[in-house]
Image: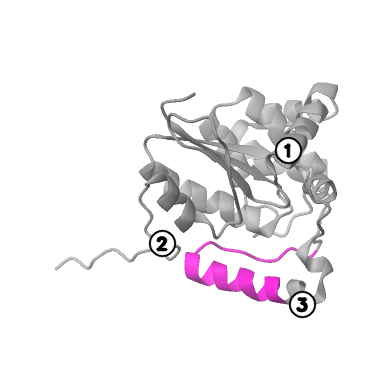
Amino acid sequence: MSARSSIVCYYDVVSPYSYYGVKLLHRYKPQWKDVDVELRPVFLAGVLSGSKNQPPANVAAKGAYMFKDLNRLSTVSGIPMNFPSNFPAMTVPASRLLVAIQKTESVATYEQCVEKEAYWVEDKDVSQQEILINAVAPIIGADKAIKYMQQTSDKEIKQQLIDNTNEAIEAGAFGAPTFVIKKAGSDKPHLFFGSDRFEVITAFLGLPYEGLAIKASPAKL
């Protein structure tokens, strides 16, 4: 039982709403001084299979709505998005790379790597190792980027991604992003789904929330 509230975000790079969820968490987190936040990569296809769900894009009406909704989110939130030409990409290499980085690097460095816009803005093929290395190299250096990419074939790294995925399924996840939240002083987990749940999450934890739209700074006279 922790004296601090906690938020665990289960995400996959292939998920557009995970992209928004991670970006918005980064925006709000500085205001949440007494909350521990962790980003855990999962294999989204495994979560969907384990929960007997299917991707929204597989349902024609949902897919058509999703594309419109993502553009609206980008406009309102100010978070850039350029829908990738190779959607859905195989993001297992990216997820394993992020697992390897998370095991060694600082939280701040790891989160910088998670927030890279290679896929959702720059339209890079993140199934390719060279692209992934080049994406994180400016943050951690080329030597480390190559080392961590090599580690993605290690049994330990592969198993960690599997464990994260199974953990999410056991918590009740059926898609991404999924947030598992515990209030301070309690071990009881509470599940919230989707990048549009922050108003409910913050009300549940008693945290400040200024809304989805970026507030303009007041003009100085």
- Discs 3, 2 touching: Cβ within 8 Å: no
Count residues near mark 2 (Cα–Cα under 10 Å), then give few for <14, some for 14-19, many for 20+.
few
Provide the major secondary structure of the magenta segment: helix
> Which of the image's four quarters has the C terminus?
bottom left
Which residue lies at the image location 71% right of the left edge and 28% below the top edge?
100
Of the numbered discs 2 and 1, the one sitting upstream in the chain is: 1
Which residue lies at the image location 62% right of the left edge and 64% below the top edge?
81
* Mark 3 residue element: helix
Distance between the alpha carbons at the discs numbered 1 and 3: 29 Å
Check disc 3 and give the amino acid type. Answer: Ala
Residue 19 x, y percent position in the rendering: 62, 54
The nearer-to-camera label among 2 and 1 is: 1
Check disc 1 and give the amino acid type. Answer: Glu
Residue 145 x, y percent position in the rendering: 70, 32
Q: Examine the rendering and report whether any part of residue 154 can be seen.
A: yes
* Mark 1 residue element: helix
Magenta stretch in the rendered image:
65-85
Residue highlighted by disc 1: 170
